[in-house]
Image (spheres, rainbow, N blue to C red):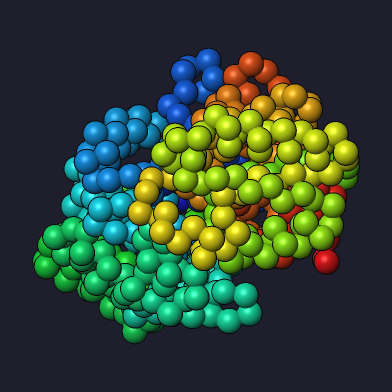
Amino acid sequence: MTGDSMSDGLLLSYYGDDFTGSTDVMEALSSGGVPTVLFTGIPDDARAARFADCRAVGIAGVSRSQTPDWMDGNLPAIFSWLKGLNAHHCHYKVCSTFDSSPRQGSIGRALEIGLRCFDQKTAALVVGAPQLRRFTYFSQLFAAYRDRVYRIDRHPVMSAHPATPMQEADLLVHLGHQTGFATACLDPEILNEPSLSEALADFDRQAVRCILIDVYDAFSQRQAGLLLDKELDRLGPFVIGSSGVEYALLEVWKDAGVARPADAPKPLQKLERIAVVSGSCSPTTARQIDVACANGFDGIPVDFQALVSGQGLEAACVEALAQASAALDAGRSPILYTARGAQSVRGHVAESGDAAGRALGHLLNALIERHDLPRAVIAGGDTSSHALSALDVFALTLRHPIPESPGSPVCDAHRSQGGVLELALKGGQIGRDDYFVKLRDGRVGIPS
């Protein structure tokens, strides 16, 4: 595809299977010179028109925490709307750790629905993103945790994820538990071969429906971008993967002159106080809470069981809101959390966290309104997906990237009743230990 053919219209549309992953894509694109808007649902024409200058459009979703039956009932309408935008590529965005199962967040089911809706024989799959320290090599997924890189089934966090533990590193084997479609991998030996086109032809003959493109370094990432772009007629517009899809395509778009350097964002203002809600049980978030509480934040536990079951819900919320308001009145920043590490929720993990996320969202909204807060944070991928529905937000655009923690930017949250809130949505294992402190102090992008 030439630069001229990409000069008009949308470059990319996408659906993120959770909200934090959706903002990850928005950050990658906007920082890379592709203005992007992320809607929290299918927008009406008036709202869509407000962002007519954007070259990429996303829908932030919740399918990562849903069943295949939910996907069957909801994804076709979303894919149909995205297809109608006629973007060059349409991306079903999944977490870069690929955590999913046949019963929850099934990537295999999303693949089946997407191929049917787009009338495609095959979809490309790109998961590796060196910018996030995620790598695929001979279809094996590796991910960083603190200062080390682990095979995903030995990753200290993802191998013990409370809802979708990753116990298989071979993504094709993992995906095979979720779909009966044939899969294949463009591995390092094939990517470096001049016979790459022959390999793709062989996959056609074998009726392969999903092709994983290994990404493990700058060369392979560029190869992935070229394949997505140059083989569009063969692979089709519908693609599955992490934000590695965008990082790969950006290399091609920059060469074509359609992704231009973005303007430097206006620095964040230092604030005396912000509010945080967290449904994450990741040890990364637990450390971030610990560091924050040593630096002017007040940690306020919220009864997870009450939020999920409804028993004692009102009392738990009234108490949490009172403590958080008192902290704000005293010039401190509250962190309302349902867990402080995985051990603190053991025994509760089988229950749905949807209700807990919504309850945390209502608590955060009450604090924002009562104390006129200009900035807030939601921690936890699934939590963000459900909490944001309580904040009256219909669209997100990039406010400020966080280079030291890619995938967790500060967004401008556009609210239905007017006004814009600075909002960060943080996945459980994303961010350095001083993440909350630096957000309050407006020091993102500044070395600790």
Say if residue 260 shows up in the picture. Answer: no
Residue 210 in percent (x, y) is at: 24, 61
> Which residue lies most toward the bottom here?
189
Q: Residue 339's spot in the image, x, y percent?
A: 57, 55
Q: Which residue shows up at 79% across the image and 28% down it? A: 371
- Relative horizontal placement of residue 350, taking residue 130 as reference (left or right): left
**Picture layout, residue 159 above or below residue 268:** below
Q: Is residue 409 visible?
A: yes
At a point 63% along the width and 24% down the height, the residue shown is 415
**Lateral position of residue 437 relative to residue 277, left or right:** right
Residue at 50% across, 35% down: 312
Name the foreground residue: 349 vs 237.
349
| Residue nearer the viewer, 246 or 326 | 326
Viewer-side residue, 411 vs 159: 159
Q: Quadrant of the C terminus?
A: bottom right
Q: Is residue 34 above or below residue 42?
A: below
Q: Looking at the rendering, which quadrant does residue 146 occupy? A: bottom right
In this rendering, the count of numbered labels is: 0
Point 49% across, 70% down: residue: 157
> Residue 302: percent from the left, percent from the top?
59, 45
Query: Taking 260 as reference, is 104 left or right?
Result: left
Specify the quadrant of the image occupied by residue 282.
bottom right
